[in-house]
Amino acid sequence: MSNFLLRSAESTVRRGAAASSSHLSRRPFSSGPAPDRKVAILGAAGGIGQPLALLMKLNPLVSSLALYDIAGTPGVAADVSHINTRAQVVGYAGEEQLGKALEGSDVVIIPAGVPRKPGMTRDDLFNINAGIVKSLCTAISKYCPNALVNMISNPVNSTVPIASEVFRKAGTYDEKKLFGVTTLDVVRAKTFYAGKAKVPVADVNVPVVGGHAGITILPLFSQATPATNALSDEDIKGLTKRTQDGGTEVVEAKAGKGSATLSMAYAGALFADACLKGLNGDPDVVECSFVQSSITELPFFASKVRLGKNGVEEVLGLGSLSEYEKESLEILKPELKSSIEKGIKFAKEN
Ligand SMILES: NC(=O)C1=CN([C@@H]2O[C@H](COP(=O)(O)OP(=O)(O)OC[C@H]3O[C@@H](n4cnc5c(N)ncnc54)[C@H](O)[C@@H]3O)[C@@H](O)[C@H]2O)C=CC1
Ligand SMILES: O=C([O-])CC(=O)C(=O)O
């Protein structure tokens, strides 16, 4: 594994007390005997899918990499397959090949669907992406019901509830195995905090809770490490807003050519790596993710989650919040609740 990814992964995956401290894992990507693991990427020919395929091909925990899309995957697979790393790569194109792509998967990553253009909210993607996610999840429940599902497709606040309902209907729902990928929010919060607080970014840790859209994204800078008193309340508000608007910043900069793809592929690769480490029995792998939760009154919520051999091992609590974070938490709940309900309603009615 290239050094940059290895170092970042080390700083992202923490051990033990770590869930609430900056203590870093010393375990690199490739330590220990790695069992065979199949990872499938659905939407693998897209803006996120292609660099994510590259990064998963670099991960020595992956023995088999299935790249599925409605079209274009044979080329991506041929390209990535020439890289001299462990994973055997196969491309699958078209619905008739979806079952083969999924069979035997340990982790399924879903970046399939349309991205935003300037002026759109993530919820504006619902009408198209809800149907895509529903049909892909129906296939997952048939071909690899035990896989961990990493949902990237937006709006995550609704697509995760859709997936849960599809699995529930199929009788395969296991709340420990369904994850909304919010790692990019954490990646951004770390970057922006390090820049403002002038601390080395590799040492920074910031939990991000709530959901994955606008004000539902709540970075907990009061828990950021290394702690600093160099930041004023206004600085914290500014960092919070920049993290919440990080996706929009990229959408506007790309000016109609899509949303975050490269940083998302990086974040998706980190989260999938954490899932694989958990499956392989690494102790105390902790990441933020949008999961079924009872830490608030909402049925799904992003917070720190301990990953293990069956997926979610423990959903960690929020810890102590500043007054500003407490207020922001109450403000985000109605929007997050309605996005969750919208997803459930869609899956029940379609
Ligand atoms: N969770 C997060 O933090 C983030 C989520 N996203 C979301 O990820 C999704 C994908 O974004 P991009 O890769 O930029 O879009 P893209 O348009 O470049 O790629 C999407 C791919 O999905 C494929 N696709 C469409 N329907 C499919 C189906 N039924 N089965 C399999 N593949 C299908 C398309 O052919 C395309 O190759 C968007 O919904 C975007 O909003 C983007 C960035 C961050
Ligand atoms: O903003 C978007 O549409 C894509 C996304 O979720 C992000 O970059 O966080």
Image (cartoon, rainbow, N blue to C red):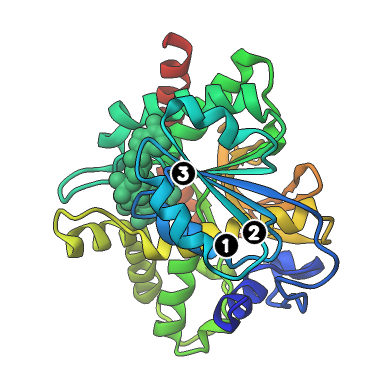
Say whether residue 17 is left or right of residue 227: right
Mark 3, other Cα within 10 Å: few <14 / some 14–19 / many ≥20: few
* Labels 2 & 1 near each other (Cβ < 8 A): yes
Foreground residue among 16 and 277: 277
Amino acid under disc 1: Lys
Residue reaching furthest top? 349
* Labels 2 & 3 near each other (Cβ < 8 A): no
Residue 345, position as x, y percentages in the image: 43, 16
The correct choice, above or below, for 231 with respect to 29 in the image is: below
Residue at 42% over, 9% down? 349
Looking at the image, tell me whether mark 3 or mark 1 is earlier in sequence order: 1
Measured in 3D between alpha carbons, the distance from the residue under mark 2 to the one under mark 3, in whole angstroms, is: 45 Å
Looking at the image, tell me whether mark 2 or mark 3 is earlier in sequence order: 2
Residue 190 in view (yes/no): yes
Disc 1 designates what residue? 57
Disc 3 designates what residue? 330
Which type of secondary structure does the marked residue at label 1 adopt?
A: helix
Disc 2 designates what residue? 87
Which type of secondary structure does the marked residue at label 2 adopt?
A: loop
Which mark lies nearer to you, 3 or 1?
Answer: 1
The correct choice, above or below, for 193 with respect to 133 in the image is: below
Residue 310, position as x, y percentages in the image: 79, 42
